[in-house]
Amino acid sequence: MSDDLTTIVLGAIERAPHWIRRDLESKDHVVRVQAEEALAAMIADALRKADDRSQ
């Protein structure tokens, strides 16, 4: 399962839009937190969809 999780998370990160990648490096704390939250939501959604497919 660990390899599957890694593949799912990596896929979500690879699909992250350019603005998220850029904003993760921001010195502005608010901008960085928003990007982190958006990426976390994308990863959570990918995991949820993978779980739905496995059932």
Image (cartoon, rainbow, N blue to C red):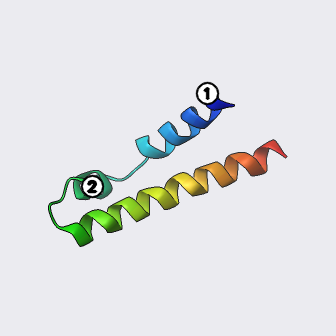
Q: Residue furthest top?
A: 3
At 56% from the left edge and 33% from the top edge, which residue is drawn?
A: 7
23 with respect to 2 (left or right):
left
Residue closer to the observer: 1 or 13: 1
| Cα–Cα gap, marks 1 and 2 | 25 Å
- Crowd tier of the residue under label 2, counting other residues whose Cα lies within 10 Å: few below 14, some 14–19, many 20 or above: some
At 80% from the left edge and 42% from the top edge, which residue is drawn?
A: 54
* Residue 32, image x, y percentages: 27, 63
Position of 31 relative to 10 (above/below): below
Q: Which mark is residue 24?
A: 2
At 24% from the left edge and 59% from the top edge, which residue is drawn?
A: 23
20 with respect to 26 (left or right):
right
* Residue 39, image x, y percentages: 43, 56
Query: Residue flagged by tag 2: what amino acid is it?
Result: Leu
Query: Residue flagged by tag 1: what amino acid is it?
Result: Asp
17 with respect to 11 (left or right):
left
Q: Which residue is mark 1?
A: 3
